[in-house]
């Protein structure tokens, strides 16, 4: 599960997310999503309820809020 936010998302990170089809929380702050698999907050929460060993990666401390 990935949280993306400003100020910068590298091309390498975007390409890796697409390559491995990692789900990305739709925070409304990601521009040029292209082929990213954006999911809503309810799906995001449910994923963690169903998969207790899941991990979260974020590229920016801005998305922690």
Image (tube, helix red, strand yellow):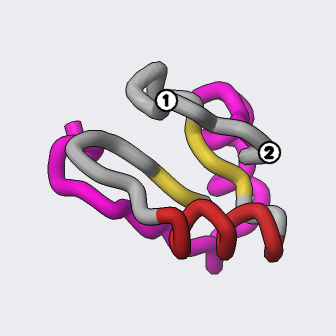
The residue drawn where x is 77% and y is 57% is 50
Q: How many marks?
A: 2
Q: Is residue 36 above or below residue 2?
A: above
Q: Position of residue 13 (x, y in %)?
A: 52, 70
Check disc 1 and report its element: helix, strand or loop.
loop
Q: Position of residue 32 (x, y in %)?
A: 57, 33
Depth check: give the residue in front, 34 or 27: 34
The residue drawn where x is 54% and y is 58% is 2
Depth check: give the residue in front, 5 or 40: 5
Residue 35, picture quadrant: top right
Residue under label 1: 31
Residue under label 2: 35
Q: Is residue 35 left or right of residue 33?
A: right
Q: Is residue 63 above or below residue 30?
A: below
Q: Position of residue 17 (x, y in %)?
A: 68, 66
Decide whether residue 12 is among the magenta residues: no
Which quadrant is home to the N terminus?
bottom right
Depth check: give the residue in front, 49 or 57: 57
Which quadrant is home to the C terminus?
top left
Magenta segment: 37-65
Disc 1 to disc 2, C-alpha distance: 12 Å
Q: Is residue 31 left or right of residue 42?
A: left
Q: Is residue 14 left or right of residue 49?
A: left
Check disc 2 and report its element: helix, strand or loop.
loop
């Amino acid at each position: 599960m990935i949280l993306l936010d400003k100020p910068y998302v590298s091309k390498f990170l975007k390409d890796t997310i697409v390559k491995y089809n990692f789900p990305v929380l739709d925070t409304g702050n990601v521009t040029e999503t292209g082929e990213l698999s954006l999911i809503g907050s309810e799906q995001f929460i449910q994923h963690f309820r169903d998969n207790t060993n899941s991990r979260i990666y974020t590229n920016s401390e801005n998305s922690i809020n």
